[in-house]
Amino acid sequence: MAKLIMTADDSASVRQMVAFTLKQNGYEVIEAVDGKDALTKLSSKKVDMLLTDLNMPHLDGIGLIKGVRSSALNKFVPIIMLTTESNDGKKSEGKAAGATGWIVKPFKPEQLIAVVKKILG
């Protein structure tokens, strides 16, 4: 069975590109338009990985990570920040909240797939 990955980003073009790249490599994808939408969908759906932007309306990536880490269903799921932020302070904040890794946009599709494969095996 294909691994299920959620992508949370307020940019439709980024969501489409990430979903396209993942689907081409055999993954199933659920899309969320922001952190709040992601938490709603994750409350009833177990995923294998979460890819999230940092800067989103309604609930940012850090808030989303904290929400996921406090829920029983996806508490231990790997979470990758996919963001334009490369600031060390933000990275530390993300790691402290429970982020597994960090990819800076713009990124190459093969870079994304390499990270996903490394984490999901």
Image: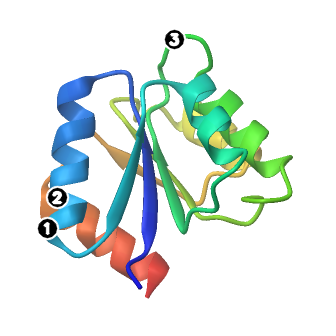
Q: Say left or right for 71 vs 91.
A: right
Q: Which residue is mark 1?
A: 24
State the SS at label 1: helix
For this rendering, which residue is in front, 37 or 90? 37
The amino acid at mark 3 is Pro
Q: CA distance from mark 3 to mark 2?
A: 24 Å
Q: Which residue is mark 2?
A: 21
Residue 57's mark? 3
For this rendering, which residue is in front, 104 or 38? 38
The amino acid at mark 1 is Gln
Q: CA distance from mark 1 to mark 2?
A: 5 Å
Q: Earlier in the sequence, mark 3 or mark 2?
A: 2
State the SS at label 3: loop
Q: CA distance from mark 1 to mark 3?
A: 29 Å
Vertical arrangement, residue 61 with respect to residue 117, above or below: above
Vertical arrangement, residue 34 with respect to residue 18, above or below: above
Q: Do callouts 1 and 2 mark residues in contact (Cβ within 8 Å)? A: yes
